Amino acid sequence: VIKSSQEQAVRVITLNHPPVNALGATMRQELKAQLDHAFSDDSVKAIVLASALPLFCGGADIQEFRTQQLWQSPDLPFLCNYIDNAPKRIIAAINGAAMGGAVEIALACDHRVARRQATMGLPEIKLGLLPGAGGTQRLPRVTNINVALDMILNGNPVSAKAALETGFLDRIIEDDDDFSQAVLAWAEELIENNAPLQRCAQMVVDMQDISSDIFRLKRDDIKQRMPGQLAPLRCIKALEAASTEPLATGLAHEKAFFLELLTNSQARARIHLFFAERAAQKIPDVTQATPQREIKSVAVLGAGTMGTGIAIALINADVPVILLDVSNEQLAQGLQRIQDTLQRAQDKGRLTSTLARQRMALLTSTLHYADISNADLVIEAVSESMSTKQAVFKQLDEICKPRTILASNTSTLDLDAIAAATTRADDVIGLHFFSPANIMKLTEIVRGEQTSPEVINTLLRFSKRINKVPAVVKVCDGFVANRMLEPYFREASRLLLEGATADQVDGVLTDFGMPMGVLSMGDLAGIDVGYLVRQANRSRYAHDPSYQAVQDKLYSLGRYGQKTARGCYRYKGKKKLIDAELPGLCLELAFDLGVQRRKIANQEILERCQRFWISGLAWWPTFLRE
Ligand code: 3HC
Ligand code: NAI
């Protein structure tokens, strides 16, 4: 898994353990052995850590987090300290993605060089952890406290360009240069010039010009943005220790926090999710050998809530889009919504005006189906009506070129019935986004009876290209996510009938850690959409007259949620307000339905809603197999 070679005075140690050079026990043992060999060889004046794979290294072996192998000697913290105290100069040659423990190994080296297209990240927070091999102590020393807070708390990789600007990287090598040769030449230069070694134990975190409130302010921000999450708070405490304590003391704090987090249920759940996300993409008849089609242009049908969100997700991923609607007014409103969304991102400093212009330039619109005949992929997001969708797919079948993939964003309609309206059922598939489609990561790839493996494979890769997490599901009621959502949403609505208020129910759920309460989410997705979905399945779910009575009542009053500025809540623009009339409406309904009302404790609300997530999660594999 590791080999080494020598060029004059430079020993190159190359990691070669597909798929990602994960730093499991064997890798760590072999790396230490290679280092010891290089340390004891007087002909070696500098050591280069390199990778034989397209990426550099994916960090610690996450598989080991569920076993004690994580601490099998030499563990990663030891290895980083070993490198940071090496008797010889060590250079990290980052040729591609470097994540987690890989970045920590690089931070312990004296020098860091990367190819222009390489990325570097500390994603531990996404696993409910913190960088546990020195990242919280070395990154702020090598760069600065603000860079370290940002990188560790958001967990997203940064480009080589950004890493050079922050001081993480010493040098970038252009992609078309011979990376290995350029690194060797630089190593010789460092030896020649006897360049100073970077040893973190001699470095301190520069806190000049940094407000003494920085950590308190960060904690307040985290408590707002990530309520209930433990890892971000421990990241801040570890970085606070880095700013005041010597390296060895800070490392001890970091290790204690890492051990605390590793045994916490939040980390266990997130580590499960890491592997579950990948397992959901493993399809028996879709393998590496399965071909895929090139997607150069996409047509989106329907400029409504979903169509516009999908169009934004596509242009954000540099995919050209033709947005079609049959209503001029809807199309105009849809284009305006897209423009407004990009403007809001610019106002928040998340998007430059140049990038916004480039993205809008990828978007064209039309009222005519003839204009989309050459699209490689059509994503249909028209109204949730089987007759409408069948008519649309019949039309697409007639006008689109052969091998165009026809995808429906239907929430729960039978995809096979939609495919039956065409002569190309093997090219018909479901691509189910979640509202808001430009934000939510999950896409359900719904395979019909006749959907070909090539089409499934194409959309699996396309979903990842547009930064979504795909899960392949079969045609069944609600697919997976909405099937899990149904009992959860039903219970929350039932609690309103029994005496809870909307903000009490949603408050319990967000305090638990849900990003949004399910009643607020229903207002966002559209009470009308939920009603139409229920109509298609009422016989299956409505086991008593009180089933979703509140949601049905709101629908009958034309209160569709955010889109009509009133649902469970009232809305002034994006601002959500309590609707003082809702409790009275629920009281009347309860009386008519003979439902007993009482004061309901928060704990009961959590237990009754939580019960459905757990059953839903337990059933997930069943849904996939169906
Ligand atoms: N450990 C174990 N397996 C890993 C892994 C890791 N760190 N990273 C990826 N894998 C596995 C995946 O599960 C997948 O396995 P499969 O083929 O059996 O499904 C395979 O490697 C390929 O993964 P991807 O499909 O994600 O490959 P990509 O090429 O798309 O992406 C990557 C490569 C950027 C490395 C991406 O896999 C990634 O971001 N991985 C997670 C990185 C991470 O979280 N590292 C931190 C670990 S925690 C840590 O380092 C603790 C330290 O601070 C002490
Ligand atoms: P919407 O009502 O907001 O938008 C539908 C759009 O389709 C309208 O602009 C309408 O003018 C247009 N349209 C109607 N017939 C058309 C045709 N023949 N050709 C082209 N355009 C046509 O609906 P929404 O909420 O965007 O839903 C669209 C689809 O997405 C539905 O199938 C829905 O079930 C599904 N969906 C909705 C979600 C939500 O949260 N709203 C979530 C996931 C899927």
Image: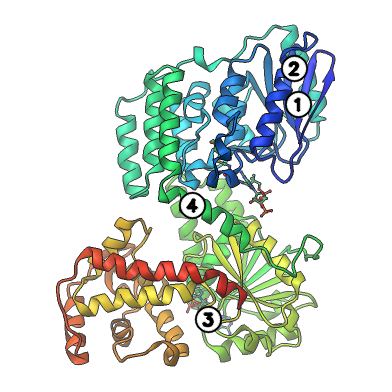
Q: Image point 52% across, 56% down: which residue?
A: 273
Q: Is the residue under label 4 in contact with that under label 2 (CB below 8 Å)?
A: no
**Residue beneath disc 4:** 270
Residue 529 drawn above or below residue 341: below
**Residue beneath disc 2:** 38
**Residue beneath disc 1:** 13
Q: Image point 49% across, 21% down: which residue?
A: 141
Q: Amino acid at mark 2?
A: Ala
Q: Position of residue 246 (x, y in %)?
A: 42, 16
In-image side of 71 versus 510 (left or right): right
Q: Closer to the observer: label 3 or label 4?
A: 4
**Residue beneath disc 3:** 412
Measure how far apart labels 2 and 3 are at the Cα level.
61 Å
Which is more N-terminal, label 4 or label 2?
A: 2
Which is more N-terminal, label 4 or label 1?
A: 1
Q: Amino acid at mark 1?
A: Ile
Q: Would residue 218 be seen by someone viewing this image from the given angle?
A: yes
Q: Residues within 10 Å of mark 1 (few under 14, many from 20)?
A: many
Q: Secondary structure at mark 4?
A: helix
Q: Amino acid at mark 3?
A: Thr
Measure how far apart labels 2 and 1 are at the Cα level.
9 Å
Q: Is the residue under label 1 in contact with that under label 2 (CB below 8 Å)?
A: yes
Q: Secondary structure at mark 2?
A: helix
Q: Image point 42% across, 67% down: which residue?
A: 614
